Each structure stands twice: as C-alpha cells, then as structure tokens.
Image (tube, rainbow, N blue to C red):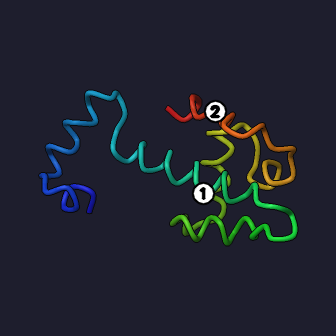
Amino acid sequence: MIADAHNMSVRYLHKLFEQEEITVSRWILRQRLERCRRDLLRATGTAPTVARVARRWGFVSPSHFSRAFRAAYGMSPREWQTAKPLPQGRLDTADLT
C-alpha cells in the first residue's frame, strides 16, 4: 500500500528504510503506537477506551496492543492514560527503535 501510494516497488521501499536502520513494519508500528499514545491523552471526560483506541489504529488484539505499548513506553496503555501528561512536545519516541 505504501509503495503503491508513492509509485515505487516494495523492494525499493524496503531499500529506502535500510538506510534509516529501521524496517518498514517497525516504522509503521512506531507510528501507530505514537498515535495511540496521543489519543489516550485526551481529556478524561472525552477519552476513548483503550480497546477503542487500539482498534482505531489497527490493533485487532487488545493483548497484543498492550504488550507492544508496554514494550515501547514502559507502562500499560491504561497507566499512560491516567498518568500526568508530559509538557507539549515532550513525547519521547527514542525507545521505539
């Protein structure tokens, strides 16, 4: 899908990511988790459930989502949702590589 959208072969797309020292699938996972993390920080009154956020970003299994989230951020999605958010612009994605 990504390769088609940019008029390139899948092989060439993977070649581009080799230069970045990350796989395409890892990059996609990182992007999805980052968007989940952002969505989980919405104001408590309007915050969607963890399961809804996971489904929205393509995680079919809530347990897989929770494991991936914990591996990336060191806490569960629920813990992140209830934790005090960092100042704007302070979301650290270094642990996702």
Q: State the image quarter where residue 71 is shown.
A: top right
Residue drawn at x 57%, y 70% as measured from the top left:
56
Specify the farthest residue to the front. Answer: 88
The residue that label 2 is drawn on is 92
Between disc 1 and disc 2, the foreground one is: 2
Q: State the image quarter where residue 64 is shown.
A: bottom right
Q: Amino acid at mark 2?
A: Asp
Give how far across and how far down residue 94 sits, in percent: 57, 28
For the residue carrying disc 1, how many other residues have a C-alpha within 10 Å: few (<14), some (14-19), or many (20+)? few
Residue drawn at x 78%, y 67% as measured from the top left:
47
Q: Is residue 47 above or below residue 96?
A: below
Residue drawn at x 65%, y 49% as measured from the top left:
67
For the residue carrying disc 2, how many other residues have a C-alpha within 10 Å: few (<14), some (14-19), or many (20+)? few
Give how far across and how far down residue 77 sits, in percent: 74, 53
Give how far across and how far down residue 44 sits, in percent: 86, 63
Relative side of 19 to 49, left or right: left
Q: State the image quarter where residue 60 is shown.
A: bottom right
Check the picture and name the quadrant holding the N terminus: bottom left
Q: Is residue 7 above or below residue 12?
A: below
The residue that label 1 is drawn on is 64
